[in-house]
Image: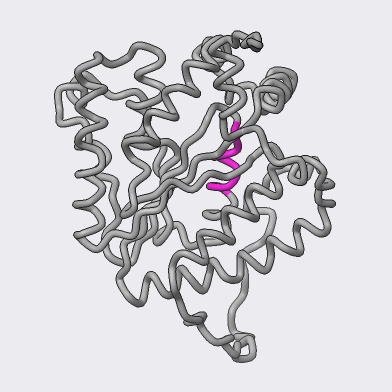
Amino acid sequence: MTHKVEKKSVKAIVAENDDFYHDIEQEKKKKLHRKEYDKLLMKLEIELVKLQEWVKANKLKVVVVFEGRDAAGKGGVIKTIAGCLNPRICRIVALGIPTEKEKSQWYFQRYVSKLPAGGEIVLFDRSWYNRTVVEQVMGYCTNDEYEEFLRSCPEFEKMLIRSGTILLKYWFSVSDHEQEKRFQDRIKDPTKRWKISPMDIESRDKWVEYSMAKDKMFSYTDTKQSPWYVVHADDKKRARLNCIDHLLDLIPYEDLTPKPLKLPPLKHDVAYIRPPVAEQTFVPGKY
């Protein structure tokens, strides 16, 4: 007796195996209320400040790479991390389209110039991995350039790690349904419309190609020395909390938070006479 084998499309096969299809239990989780989220985030922000002071004191070099599909939530978690830290210690790097000069350089060169010195944390909002997903799928690089990247990237990252750099890589995974919702939200909201570009629209038609490119990228660059960590990102709040908590677990640190300062009493110099208020130009109090 023979069994009829059902033929499946490439899209169906990719969909079955892609990382954005979460466990049933993950889908059943209720969304966090804002109050509960803020409470949990506050605890993590306190720990981020402790990590910052440890990085500064020990001259550590920390690089965190954030990748994923458009509207996956990379920017949100990056802003959340950087928002409570000293901008002189924690920098965000989000490079634009390379110039003609940069195109003629060694591919990693413009990223190397943004790497941290001792005592710094750098958060890459997209990174050198642009080549393996965006550039490859959209046809912005040649096949030779793409294949060379896959060969050289693991070696490049090994050099970074050997030089004492702590390298963490996060892939934010979002479903096609949730991505569509976020695109529609950006289109409707004038304050978010700048976040969506013609290339984002074009990428919607290349969902399968992006999935295949990401899988191939992982096969080359998800190494023992520098693994990828996948973040389920359909729930933005949980994605941020999970990512930050995981990051804190990966870097051992101790609490070097400065002790509270005692402010001396304010001094009032009775001999000082302030100029008339009418001589100053104030911003109108419209609100």
Q: Residue at x 28, y 16 (%)?
A: 141
Against 239, is 163 above or below? Answer: below
In terms of image quadrants, where is residue 128?
top left
Pick whichever, 73 or 265, lies toward us.
Answer: 73
Q: Position of residue 155 (x, y in %)?
A: 20, 44
Query: Looking at the figure, which quarter contains the N terminus?
Result: top right
Pick whichever, 78 or 262, lies toward us.
Answer: 78
Against 38, is 70 above or below? Answer: above
Q: Position of residue 114 (x, y in %)?
A: 29, 46
Query: Which stretch appears magenta?
Result: 72-79
Q: Position of residue 71 (x, y in %)?
A: 60, 29
Pick whichever, 237 or 207, lies toward us.
Answer: 207
Horizontal side of residue 150 vs 77, given as left or right: left
Horizontal side of residue 179 vs 135, given as left or right: right
Residue 73 magenta: yes
Pick whichever, 270 or 237, lies toward us.
Answer: 237
Against 1, is 84 above or below? Answer: below
Magenta-drawn stretch, dominant element (helix, strand or loop): helix
Query: Looking at the figure, which quarter contains the C terminus?
Result: top right
Residue 100 magenta: no
Horizontal side of residue 58 vs 178, given as left or right: left
